[in-house]
Image: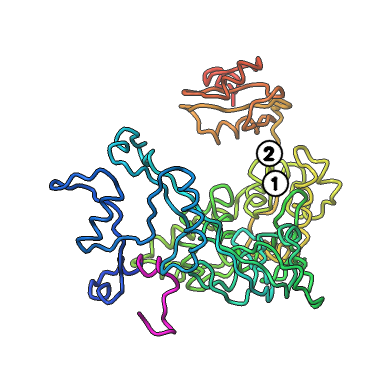
Amino acid sequence: MQDEENKFANARNLAAGSLRQLDSKITATRPLNIFIFNVQKCDDIKFESHYESLKYLEKIGFNVNPVKILCNNIEEAKAAINKIGNDRENLAFGIDGAVIKVDNLELREKIGTTFKTPKWAIAYKYPPEQKETVLKDIICSVGRTGVITPMAILEPIVVAGSKISKTTLHNEDFIKEKDLKIGDTVIIQKAGDVIPEVVKPVIEKRTGNEIEFSMPDKCPVCGGPAIREVGEAAVRCIGIECPARNFKNIVHFTSKEGMNIDGLGEKIVAQLLDKKLIKNISDIYFLKLEDIKSLKKDGTKFAQNLLDSIENSKQNDLDKLICALGIRHIGSKSAKILAKKFKSIDGLINANYEELVLVEDIGETTADSIFDFLKQEQTIDLIKKLKVANVNMNLKNKDNKDNRFEGKSFVLTGSLSSFTRDEASKIIEDFGGKTSSSVSKKTDFVLAGEEAGSKLTKANELGIKVISEEDFKLMIKNI
């Protein structure tokens, strides 16, 4: 087929890759073959059974699977499945199962088919092929969300037609449950004959030189804190400038929920990073017209608009900045609560854990997340750079003496014609009220627009007061 250096990993990859070739001459050089398994239509001969049609195909020269067993009852079918399974390793082609079919073609017609599959056939999957190899090492990689994943480095071995040299170990709990140690002889299989996985260690082959693995307490990429929250299996890097999660952090920072920098979406952020025009979040505020202009042909107008949007974002209120930082468990609503409570980013940074826990709607898990995030060096460094760029760090003066909705909770459902959901929520919050995404006994009002759904139904069941858009306008009159 090919020399040893360029040998295909397995028949499936060879066949699929060959058929996708745009140049048919390349496909012609590949040793492709096929087993014909059915006569779809024949005007000259009427076959009574499937087996009969296969024998006819063989007779006239077609390549037919040699592994076919005619059975008279279900016991013979079970025995045939076992025989094929036992002979699986010796076949000249790879299989992962066997199919039992009704042989009589007239009976097949009577049994029929579903929309996708025949009722007269059923597939049996064999257990995955398993091999032994050595777990040489466990290394950790960092994903775009900051999750640190342990990866098994294996002595390369061919399993189910593929050479396997590494595979994921998912998380710390998985490693402990499997009792895996570096240096173990382990059993490998491909789950569903597709995804490599470590099944278990071979305990009896341990020498005593195996090494226990423990998850790092620092990110292997940036050195920032690696945190595992209570109730979670994943360990996460929370470094806001970690290169492994930098792109995602910047995109969130510039998003509508964050600093709302119009024009600075995923595509432009990717271009800025690729061209090394920015390395981290703070670099956004030091971009020049020439930098941005280079991203597009005749891009002067685009560049100026983006610079204006970046400049305008500096005047955002404190809650937008808090939300943009991407603190785990903190969304726009929690950011508004924190901004109102602590008045400035420094006030929030200097808050102790006890103060955070006592904030309304901030529980212990969220308080932990805020405290850990704001105390790390990368966050403090970013805040310093944003201050140099003159990004607003304080709650703007909003002395609103009208707290008509203080202590009241609203749920919005359906389509509103005079307001967006965000606009209606802002009005409620400006008057001291709160909005929630779900209806409960603590809900005071459900503002129902057109095509209100299950939330309206639940409100009626609980006896919660339902108000229309017109009712809401009367409630906020004089603003």
Residue 207 seen in the current view = yes
Q: Amino acid at mark 1?
A: Leu
**How is the model colour-coded?**
rainbow
Most foreground residue, 270 or 122: 122
Most foreground residue, 78 or 390: 78
Labels 2 & 1 near each other (Cβ < 8 A): yes
Q: Amino acid at mark 2?
A: Lys
Circle count: 2
Q: Is residue 106 left or right of residue 100?
A: left
Residue 282 seen in the current view = no
Q: Which residues are magenta?
A: 1-16
Quadrant showing the C terminus? top right
Residue at image position (81%, 46%) is: 356
Residue neighbourhood size for the residue with mark 2, other residues' Cα within 10 Å, grouped as few (<14), some (14–19), many (≥20): few
Residue at image position (63%, 16%) is: 461
* 394, above or below 205, in the image: above
Residue 185 location in percent, x, y?
70, 72
Whether 3 is among the magenta residues is: yes
User: Which numbered disc covers residue 22?
Assistant: none
Residue at image position (49%, 45%) is: 75
Q: Residue furthest left?
A: 44
Image quadrant assignment for residue 142: bottom right
* 405, above or below 275, in the image: above
Q: Residue furthest right?
A: 354
User: Which numbered disc covers residue 398?
Assistant: 2
Secondary element at image label 2: loop
Residue 286 location in percent, x, y?
56, 67
Q: Which residue has dot 1 on it?
A: 395
Residue at image position (37%, 66%) is: 296
Secondary element at image label 1: loop
CA–CA distance between discs 2 and 1? Answer: 8 Å
